[in-house]
Amino acid sequence: MLDLIITFFSKQISDNYIYEITIAILLLCLYPIISRIINFIVKNYFEKWINRTTTKIDSIILSSIVPSINLFILAGLFYIGVMQLQLGGLQAVMDTIFNLLLIIPIVFFLIKFATQSISYYFSGKGKEAKFNEAAVDILMQVVQVAFVVIGILLILSNLGYNISALLTGLGIGGLAFALASQDLLKNFFAGISLVFDKAFNKGERVKFDKYSGRIEEVRLRSTKLRTFEGTLLTIPNTKLSDNVVENVSQIPKVRVSMTIGVEYSTSSKKLKQAKEIIYNAIKNNEHADEEKAWIYFDNFSAYSLDIQVIYFAKELTMEDWPKRVQFKEEINFEIKEKFEKAGIVFAFPTQTIHINK
């Protein structure tokens, strides 16, 4: 029986022994099992070992290669099994398949490694300096596009296309492409201009046109703005570049400006007392900067005597939303309570009609 098996596997089919063909088929069939074993080893041994090291580069390399590891395993098994066979006219096809199995995971690995390295370097972990996150996102997107283009060119070259002729053709057709994609290019350069001019950063609150919200993402073509109603706006970068964008987050300290109107029947003495009450309400608040407070009798309006009030916080910024609201509310309550005790009445719209007899 053993002799029959040895004799059978020693026979040749198209210049290949049956045992060589069997090994190639078994390797490809065992791919799922081998892949799981290698992934288990990587996850349970390599990751634990790398997590104990002090350097970050090994973690970046491992996390970058893990998404592509299955294709690397398949390429290795394909090479060990199929590529060792004498395939005759199919050899060129198998070479192409093997190259594709290598090019795709290598490109994915390079994209992952480059973006993670850029993110780490510019995040402040690799260096102490803090960089504009929107600019970092743009840089990572440019890197991703560059590697994808390189990958496509390698695949086309592997499929037999003449890359030099292709690039020459692209150069000739570059003008037509540029004309056809004017909006895309405008948005791209507008996005570059916005982030490198430091108009805003990710997470900052901005006002644009009639919209207000936080910058959620800056991409090559558009910017994502999350409004305070929860909706997500996708704004072409040219729109932001060509219009006034107010970066509210860059206001160094909270500034409050309001007009308090009292009745026309209020005496000058009471009006001066009202100013004093407002000033004391600001002065007594721990967050208010009393040295930067202006209270003055501003205007005789249609139905009120207007007191203009402008004051600043000591440290609160526009990002401190709950504290900012509470800060303003505390001062407003104290002004209201003291006005009530002093008999100073807030004005509301009134009309006086004089009848001539």
Image (cartoon, helix red, strand yellow):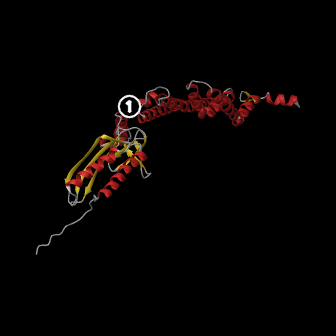
Towards the viewer: 191 or 188: 191
Residue 350, percent across and down? 23, 65
Towards the viewer: 18 or 290: 290
Residue at disc 1, secondary structure:
helix
> In the current view of this chain or complex, which residue is farthest to the right?
1
> In the current view of this chain or complex, which residue is farthest to the left?
357
* Amino acid type shown at disc 1: Gly
Look at the picture and state if 306 lies above or below 184.
below
- Taking the image as shown, residue 110 lies to the left or right of residue 320, namely right
> In the current view of this chain or complex, which residue is farthest to the bottom?
357
Towards the viewer: 31 or 275: 275
- Taking the image as shown, residue 73 lies to the left or right of residue 341, namely right
> Disc count in the image?
1
- Which quadrant, please, contains the C terminus? bottom left
Residue 319, percent across and down? 41, 42
- Taking the image as shown, residue 285 lies to the left or right of residue 160, namely left
Residue 217, percent across and down? 44, 41
Residue 167, percent across and down? 42, 30
Q: Which residue is drawn at 64% across and 30% down?
A: 47
Badge 1 crowding class, 10 Å Cα cut-off, few under 14, some 14 to 19, many 20 or more, is few
- Which quadrant, please, contains the N terminus? top right
Towards the viewer: 24 or 251: 251
Kindly identify which residue carries mark 1.
Answer: 171
